[in-house]
Structure formats: C-alpha cells, structure tokens
Amino acid sequence: MSYPPQNRQAGADREIPSTLSTLYQEVILDHYRRPRNKGVLEGATHTITMNNPLCGDVIELMLRVAGDRIQEARFAGRGCSISQASASMLTGRVAGRTLEEAVELSARFTRLLHGDEGLLDDDDLGDLRALAGVSRFPVRIKCALLGWNCLEELSDAGDDESVAGPE
Amino acid sequence: MEANATPRDRAASHDLADIRAQFPILEREVNGRPLVYLDSAASAQQPQRVIDRIERYCREQHANVHRGAHALSVEATEAFEGARQLVAGHVGVSDPAEIVFTRGTTESVNLVAASWGAANVGAGDEIVLTKMEHHSNIVPWQLLARRTGAVLRYVDVTPDGRLDLDDYARLLGPRTRLVGVTHVSNGLGTINPVVEITELAHDAGALVLVDGAQAAPHLMVDTHAIGCDFYAFSGHKMCGPTGIGALWARRELLEGMEPYQGGGEMISEVTLEGSKWAEIPHKFEAGTPNIAGAVGFGEAVAFLSDVGHDRLAAHEDEIIAYALERLSAVPGVTLYGPRENRTSVFSFTLGDIHPHDLSTILDQGGIAIRAGHHCNQPLMDHMGVSATARASFYLYNTRAEVDALIDGLGMAARVFGGVSSTE
C-alpha cells in the first residue's frame, strides 16, 4: 500500500541529530547503566524520597553527615536516564562538602541546566557539565533536578530535623 | 509493498489521503520533520469541519441557551440541543434527554459518584472496579468510599492483559452496589466484554458504569445493547474539542438522582426556602454550559458517522495487524496487552531505554507518543513496570507512520549504543 511520500522517514541508518548526541552523551548513559553509589546507605543521617508525579521518576537520597560535612551519599530510585545519571553524579560530587556548599553547587548546576554556558568551564561541576544539553529540552530539566531537589529539601529541613524514615 | 498493491489497496490509500487532508494539523512539521501523531488516545486531532463549526457558532450563533426569546438564543439552543441529539445517536441512544453534557469522562464519573453514589452507597457496601481502570474511574470512587465507608474491590488482570472474569465473579456479592469498568483499556487497548460483565453485575443486583472514553472513538457503541446503566465518554478523544463530554444513563435513573451541582439552568423554580429541579438532562447541567464545545462535539460525531463505522473498523484492523507485526519484530521491544480483541493503542518498552528518553528521541523525529503511567498506576504496578511508551493510532494514521515509529525506535537504540535487557 502506498501513502503520501512526505510521511516516509529516512531509514534507520539516519544520522543521530546533534541535539540528541549532545543530550545523551556517553558519560550520561554510563552513569545510567552503571550508577555510582546506588543502594542503601548504612548509618544514613538524612534520608528523603521525592518523585515527579508527572512522569513517575523516583529518587531516594541518603546522606551520612558527620561534623558539618557530608561523608557519604547514596541514592536509590528509578526513572529516565537523565534523572538517574544526575543523581548518580550528585552522590559523587557532594561527598566532602558541607550541606551549604552542596546546595550552592546545586544552584550552579541549576543555572547550567537553564543555559548558562559560562559554567561549562566550571571544573567543580565535573561530570555534571555533560548534562548541559538538557537546557535544549525544557521539559526534561525537572528530571535532571530531581536528586538535587532532594538535597535542597534535606538542607531546608536542617541537621537536627532529619527526614529519615524507618529503614 | 507498492509493487504488490492491489486496486483495493490503492483505493484504501486514496481514501486515507482524503481523510488526512481534512486534518490541517497533520500538515505541520515538528522539529523539522513531518508530524507523526501517535497520541490520539490522549487527545485526538480535529478535522477542519469541527473547527469551522465551532467558529461559525462563535461568529454567527452565539447567545446563552434556554434563556432568551430572541433569535440568537433560539439558534444557540437549537445548535446545542441538536448536538445532544447527534451525540446520543452516536452511542445508540434515541432519547436525547438521557445524555447529560459534562466536561468529559472524568466529570461524568464524578457526577455519578457524587449524585447516585451518595444516595445509594453506604458503609460496608461494595464497589467493584478493575485494576485496568483509568485514575478517573478509581479516584471518584475512593472519594465516595472515604465519605461513606464503602469498600472498593478490584478485578485482577491476566498476564495477557485481560480482565480475570473468574476473579470478577468471585468479587460480586450481595453488598455490591456498582461495577465500574472501562470498555477499552487506555493502557493496554483491551476491549472488555462489557455485555457479559453487565449481565453478571445485574444478576448480583448491582448497577454498571462503563467508562467509554477509549471505546466511543473506535467502536460502534450501543449502550442499550451493552445493557449497562451509565456510559461516560469525552469529545476530545473522538475528533471534538476539549472540555466537553457526556454521561448517558437510563431516564428513570437520571430522574431519580439528585442534582450534581446547583445554579442556573438546572432549576424550574427557586424560592428562598428551596427549589425545584429542571427536567433531565438540564437538572445536571448547572450554569451556562460549554455551548461551543457541545456544538463541536456534535460535529465531530457527525464527521465520524460520515466516515462510517465500516471504514473506521477496516482501517483500525489494518493498523493493528501492521503495528503488531512490526513492533513485535523489533529486538528488545516488550509489548503489553492482548494480541486480539483490542484497539490500536500499543504500550511497550524498548530494552532498558526509559520511556521518557524514548519519547524525547522520537520527538526529535517529529513523532509524538505518550510516555509514563498513562493515569494507570495500579495497572503499571500490576505489570511490574513504572512506565511504558504508548503509541496510539486513529483514523488518520498510516502504515508509513508505523514505519516511522519503527525507524525512530532504531534511532533510539543507536543513541543508547544498543538495547540491553532490563531483565
């Protein structure tokens, strides 16, 4: 059966558009498929679970804070490559920082997602810079921020007021 | 395929091109590529004649309905009530007073839960729903149960995406007041045996509400043949505008029910001490209704009726067969829902690529699909997935668009450097 030719797509060997190769960089897919610091954090002092009701993505962020520094961060959850890779990267980037410093990093990362290209030179953001391509996909920004929203919630709740649930 | 095209194929192709030409939105591009719209189960597109009809109403006929004696009010009322008659006819209803205009399926279900439910469901009474219901046929009953102390029970779904009728029979009992079931699953495409379900419910002394949101656009619906008590559906899933839908119920049921909302339009007499209700269906249509929406809804069902059920069904069968064949041949694709007795909505996953990533990648190729839980969280939990991709087809979709989807899945696999299994 024949249909109007304009509805034909190019073959499956069509080149990957640059917007997609920028969004789905290898380092992101690597964090998605081999997440770092995933699983229960023994001795967590801070735990919170947040979800994105629109798409069903879930991140549980667990921190072990001693003194005023995050000693260790782990996460659990499920969702798209962007939300999971971003959370995986988060756990690596926030260890060793104070909650305040981690929240400041979150603010810079948020600016990067909103297209602040100056931050591409910010070595402190590390792998997170690979997520800069998300700025071209506004509906996906909330995916990249889910883990960071957890961090900010935990920080807002304060040190004493841990949101930890029974494990 | 072109080389083997028979004269009949060519005629069908011409026919489809003619239908596509009536939908102006199909001419546009998305991300530099021709739009391939595979999200009609969320909302279908509108043909030019529906757009024109709404515009003509606004330009030439608008006034409030059932109010004035002036010419425009009479014309607007005729257009509004004419639309009710068209919508009634589309679901096999001869008495248009049995059709209540609502904002959509969701409001139709809420109306029944709030009005009929409040008067007929008490503590310990049971409402039987299914695990494949859309949230809009779950949450209104949860609200009712919370107010009344009623108990909700959910019919199980089989691994191949059908209702477990043995489980259903077990759940029916002397306390069952109502069975709420979707005619067609919005997540799986399953066509449920609503006649049999209704018979069993009636034998148990329960009423039946059928959610027809996904069925009315695709199937020849005859509420009397089904035998159910309430049938709810939406205009925008069947080529009409958003914000308008309908509830059908048998006359005596509607007459016995209390109003859903109070206000103008729904009264016959108001004093400071109390009021008398208008006749049905106006008793349930408080306030100035969505007149333009209703007129557009009426035009949409007239359009579908002009296309004809046979042509709709033949096209649907062809798309189902072709999409099933091509989708199931893609490495890494898991298809949910039955192979037969289904409509053209296909939920699937592709390896470990999350449906949202799939949707983003397909969108770059101009292909619109839905990703997520499709307002079907209990069903998703039951299937053990948190989200699926859903491609849903309608009368304007082509086999070439199935091909485009398959090519898009190939692109997604390459963006992700291959498809690995999640198992």
Image (cartoon, coloured by chain):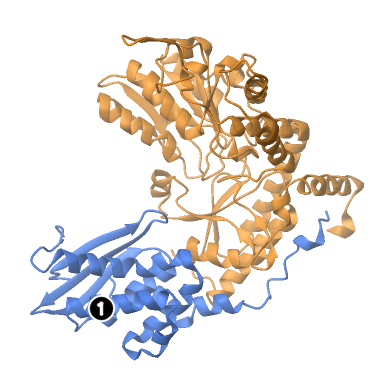
> What residue did someone put label 1 on?
A104
Return the x and y of residue B262 as percentages of the image width and height: 40, 21
Above or below, comparing residue A162 to residue A106 in the picture: above
Q: Tag 1, which secondary structure? A: helix
Shown in orange, the chain is B
User: In what quadrant of the picture does the N terminus of chain B appear?
Assistant: bottom right
At 56% across and 67% down in the image, what residue appears? B361
Which residue ends up furthest to the right in the rendered image?
Answer: B7
Return the x and y of residue B49 as percentages of the image width and height: 74, 39
A59 relative position to A139: left or right: left
Return the x and y of residue A161 as percentages of the image width and height: 10, 63
Which of B369/B197 is in front?
B369
- Residue A98 seen in this snapshot: yes
**Quarter assignment of residue B310:** top right
Shown in blue, the chain is A
Which of A112/A167 is in front?
A112
Above or below, comparing residue B101 to residue B323 in the picture: above
Q: Chain of mark 1?
A: A
At 71% across and 35% down in the image, what residue appears? B56
Q: Please state which amino acid type lies under the numbered disc 1.
A: Glu
B298 relative position to B348: left or right: right
At 63% across and 36% down in the image, what residue appears? B217
Above or below, comparing residue A124 to residue B267 in the picture: below
**Quarter assignment of residue B417:** bottom right
At 13% across and 75% down in the image, what residue appears? A65
Return the x and y of residue B213 as percentages of the image width and height: 55, 35
